[in-house]
Image (cartoon, helix red, strand yellow):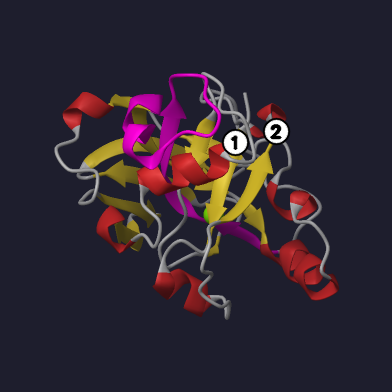
Amino acid sequence: MKFLCIGRNYVEHAKELGNEVPDEPVIFMKPKSALHQVNSPFYYPEFTNELHYECEVVLRISKNGKYVQEKAAKSYYDAISVGIDFTARDIQNELKKKGLPWEKAKAWDNSAILGVWQPMSLVNDVKNINFSMKKNGDLVQLGNTKDMIHGFDKIIAYVSNYFSLNIGDVIFTGTPKGVGECVVGDELEGFLADTTMFKLLVQ
Ligand code: MG
C-alpha cells in the first residue's frame, strides 16, 4: 500500500504557510513504512526541531484503478477517517527553499497516523463533513470538507492519472488551517464529527 497525499487543498491553510493556492492538486506520497501502528508508541523524530501536525480526512481505496473518471470515483473508496500527516516543518522549509523533493520532511517512518475506519455508508454528504483535532484538550484544527478546493472525486480521478490506485491505498485529502507544532508529552485527539477517531501521545 501507499499513501497519496494532497497538499494545499484548503485556501486558508495555503495562506497560513505563505503558499499560493494551486490550480491543480499538489500531490506527494508516503510509503507503506510511514504507517504508524495503532498500538505502538509514537516517538518524536530525532532529525527535526519543528514537528507539525496536519489533521486530515483520509479515504481508503477499495478497488484497483487507473484513469478513473470523476463520476465513477465514489466506487473506489469505501471507508473514511481522520489522520495526521506529520511533517518536519523545519526540514520541509529547507527543501522548499532549494526546490528539492519533500520526502525527508513528509515520508519518514510513522509519519502517517490513521484513525479508525468508518464505512462510507455512514456519511450522508461527502461535501459537508466536520472534522477536528484537539491538542491537550484544546481545539487546534477545525475543518469541513465543503472548504476543500478539490473534492474527493476530483482527487481520486486526478491522482489515478499518474499513479495506479490499489486496494488498501490511503488518500490524505489535505489539512485545514491551524497546523502547528507539537512536543514530547502532547496528546493529540482527532474527531470525525463528534466521534474520536484517534488518540496519540507524542513520546
Ligand atoms: Mg498535509
In terms of depth relative to the viewer, which is nearer, 140 or 155? 155
Q: Is residue 125 visible?
A: yes
Residue in the image at 56% along x and 75% along y: 17
Residue 85 location (% of width, % of height): 55, 48
Residue 2 location (% of width, % of height): 63, 30
Q: Tell me the magenta residue range.
A: 50-76
Is the C terminus in the top left, top right, bottom left or bottom right quadrant?
Answer: top right
Residue type, numbered disc 2: Pro
Residue in the image at 36% along x and 53% along y: 133
Magenta-span inclusion, residue 145: no
Question: Are the residues at dot 1 and dot 2 in contact (C-beta closer than 8 Å)?
Answer: yes
Label 2 crowd (10 A; few <14 / some 14-19 / many >=20): some
Residue type, numbered disc 1: Phe
In terms of depth relative to the viewer, which is nearer, 89 or 9? 9
Q: For mark 2, what is the residue?
A: 31
Q: For mark 1, what is the residue?
A: 3
The answer to which of marks 1 and 2 sits earlier in the sequence is 1
Q: Quadrant of residue 3?
A: top right
In terms of depth relative to the viewer, which is nearer, 100 or 55? 100
Q: CA distance from mark 1 to mark 2?
A: 6 Å
Residue 113 location (% of width, % of height): 53, 37
Left or right, 162 with respect to 179, comes to right
